[in-house]
Image (cartoon, rainbow, N blue to C red):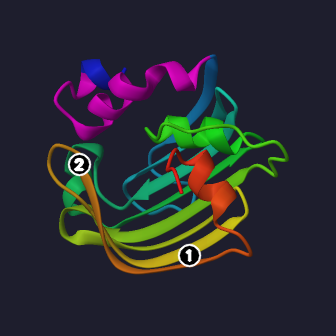
Amino acid sequence: VASKLAPASGIAEWLGRNGAAFGPAFANARIIAPPKNGAGGFSVALDGVAGPTTFTVALQSAAKPADWWAGAGKVSVVLDSPDSAGLARQFGLAASPLRDDKGAHVAVDASGVPKSGLDATIGAEFAGLTTSASGKLLMDASWHPSFNGTFAATATDVAPAMTTAGFAI
């Protein structure tokens, strides 16, 4: 779908490179325009499974769908996987499985006007590593993301997370 709607986008490129890690997959979608709260704009909710990962995505925009880039909005994404390496492969890392994998969890909440950046908080647990970040999530017109903010990580042992992520230490 992404390659048909936005063939030169960052999302289409990412899915093209890492698509094998997402199967089998299914998703449920709910689109509401205007949102239930009576405001203008629209909302989209997705949930489903992609490979080893369950996901939920909620997007709300005060703008018309054609003007979403310039309208205030909110997005939240939650990813959960019993397989840390599987989730890492979905992000494009050359990941190796762990023997006692505790799974992975990622939560992103962001709000603002997409064309000027979204104020975002990100929290993740991955192979024994707990991370948090807050700052500005930016997406260019081709949907290539960048992040400018603070990042913190804690772990009693970083070796499992580094190994699972595909880094030799």
Secondary structure mostly seen in magenta is: helix
Question: Which one is nearer the viewer's eye here, 33 or 23?
Answer: 23
Q: Quadrant of residue 145?
A: bottom left
Q: Amino acid at mark 2?
A: His
Please say if the residues under marks 2 and 1 sit with CB atoms less than 8 Å apart.
no
Image x and y of residue 14, in percent: 34, 34
Magenta residues, start to end: 5-23
Q: Residue at x 52, y 44 (%)?
A: 166
- Residue 161 in magenta stretch: no
Q: Is residue 164 left or right of residue 121?
A: right
Q: CA distance from mark 2 to mark 1?
A: 21 Å
Q: Quadrant of residue 153?
A: bottom right
The image shows residue 113, relative to residue 13, as above or below, that is below
Question: Which one is nearer the viewer's eye here, 79 or 36?
Answer: 79
Q: Is residue 106 visible?
A: yes
Image mark for residue 144: 2
Q: Is residue 46 visible?
A: no
Of the numbered discs 2 and 1, the one sitting upstream in the chain is: 1
- Residue linked to disc 1: 132
